Image (cartoon, rainbow, N blue to C red):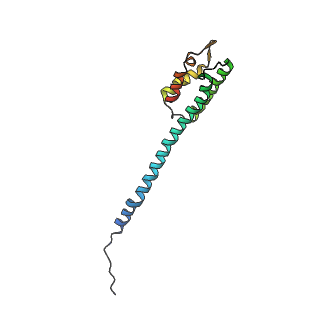
Amino acid sequence: MTLIVNDIVWWQISLESVVNSWIPGISTFLLGVWFARIDERRKLKQKLKDDLLQIFIPIFNSGQSITLSEAENAARRMLHTFNAYKRIYSGVFNKAAEEKLGAILADGFLVNNNVNKPFMEPDVIQDLIKTL
């Protein structure tokens, strides 16, 4: 019997196995992590919008008469919800809309015993919430 030995360059085989198996696997994993992060941010933004609109729409945009205590309570809950999301997830939301909505909510519902003007225009606040 004759033993045939081929001239095999082992480093080329191992390099080809890295290129053919490891690099696609690692790149797929990294792309998956990146897409999951993008999707999680999108879901987080949508959850904040939904939470704020669930407080805002029944009180300020329902077309029914409400009491001052209900309106102040809703504005306070919106402020606390907004500040909690802003504090926990800083840098996720649109900065311009975040600052405008934060200023409106920080002023409160009553300013000098008068209703805060942005609360009289619910479409403006809804648009700010949508652009977050």
- Which residue sits at x=63%, y=23%? 59
Q: Residue at x 36, y 66 (%)?
A: 13
- Name the residue rendered at 41%, 56% in the picture: 24
Q: Residue furthest bottom?
A: 1
In the rendered view, tell whether residue 4 sits above or below residue 109: below
Q: Is residue 15 left or right of residue 124?
A: left
Residue 88 x %, y %: 58, 35
Q: Position of residue 40 (x, y in %)?
A: 52, 41
Percent position of residue 120, x then y: 57, 17
Front-lying residue, 124 or 114: 124
Residue 34 lies, with reference to residue 70, above or below; the image says below
Viewer-proximal residue, 19 or 104? 104
Q: Residue furthest left?
A: 7
Q: Quadrant of residue 11?
A: bottom left
Residue 79 visible to the viewer:
no
Q: Is residue 57 above or below residue 2?
A: above
